[in-house]
Image: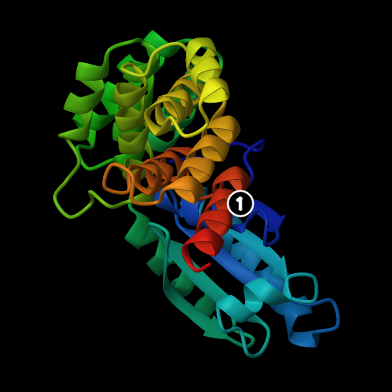
Amino acid sequence: MELNATDDLIKDSNEAGFMQDVIETSKTVPVIVDFWAPWCGPCKSLGPALEAAVKKAGGKVRMVKVNVDENQGLAGQLRVQSIPTVFGFVNGQPVDGFMGAQGPAQLDEFVAKLAAQGGEDDGMGEALEAANQMLESGEVADAAETYGAIQAEDPGNLEAIAGMVKANMLLGQPDKAKAALELVPEGKEDDALITAVRAQVDLAEAAAQAGEADGLQASVDANPDDHQARFDLALAMAANNNPEGAIEQLLELFKRDREWNDGAAKQQLFTLFDALGPKSELAKSGRRKLTSMIFL
């Protein structure tokens, strides 16, 4: 896969962007991460040499630069003990690396070895990006078709499968969404992408049975201990794109009676958190509140 001059072949990143810039990107093309600092002498020679090797690879790998002075937490998580330290990521995982200065030949070998692990994706990365853009811009049917074509070429592509699920849910075709979930390869059922879209399907199915939010709110206002009405209100709120309200209602239900209906409030909260995804600040906040209630 060739990258043109407008692609982010080499970029700076930080703790906030590391997940997207490295983990997610490395699922389509290998990513080299260079941990450096302005005061580091060897970094000043290694960085440009590594950039040259990456450019020579013609787009088969990308490079992300992380300033350890500004991202000490990230450096600590990856156990960076000295700089320069370089890691190679493929499919979201570090697969190779080295510390200290390296010669041009060694860098070329490192980059070539990493590029070989990534292989050629025959344009899959570009196709996925195009499908994602279609979905975001409201061209849902076209996105569903594109995701399906990608999955047909690459049956184990979890991003394509997740995209098929999301697109079909937006199209009001839950049966097709559930059929797409059946395409998940064995052993990948607990991947974060799949967990999130499966939770979205489960949440939508439950919300379809919940009723109208206004009437349910009136029932809860009239009788705050009407647990079923409060539970259904949370589902209706989730269906109406009000996850914050849904979380508040489910937390209140858990506070009032955590054992109601075999712990339904807690289980529905977990489903909602999964549907929001691991990056959601709302989900993180909700998890913290639920945890504090559990251990009160």
**Relative to 240, 93 lies left or right:** left
Residue at x-position 36% and y-position 56%: 118
Q: Is residue 205 above or below residue 15?
A: above
Near-viewer residue (82 or 238): 238
Residue at x-position 62% and y-position 47%: 281
Q: Position of residue 67 (x, y in %)?
A: 75, 70
Q: Position of residue 49 (x, y in %)?
A: 67, 71
Residue at x-position 80% and y-position 86%: 41
Quarter residue 18 falls in: bottom right
Q: Is residue 184 above or below residue 164?
A: below
Q: Residue furthest right?
A: 39
Near-viewer residue (207 or 157): 207
Quarter residue 36 falls in: bottom right
Quadrant location of the N terminus in the rendered image: top left
Number of labelled discs? 1
Q: Which residue is label 1 attached to?
A: 285
Near-viewer residue (216 or 118): 216
Q: Secondary structure at mark 1?
A: helix
Q: Position of residue 193 (x, y in %)?
A: 37, 43
Q: Which class describes the residues within 10 Å of circle 1: few (<14), some (14-19), or many (20+)?
A: few
Quarter residue 236 falls in: top left
Circle 1: residue type: Ser
Residue at x-position 39% and y-position 43%: 265
**Does residue 269 appear in the picture of this structure?**
yes
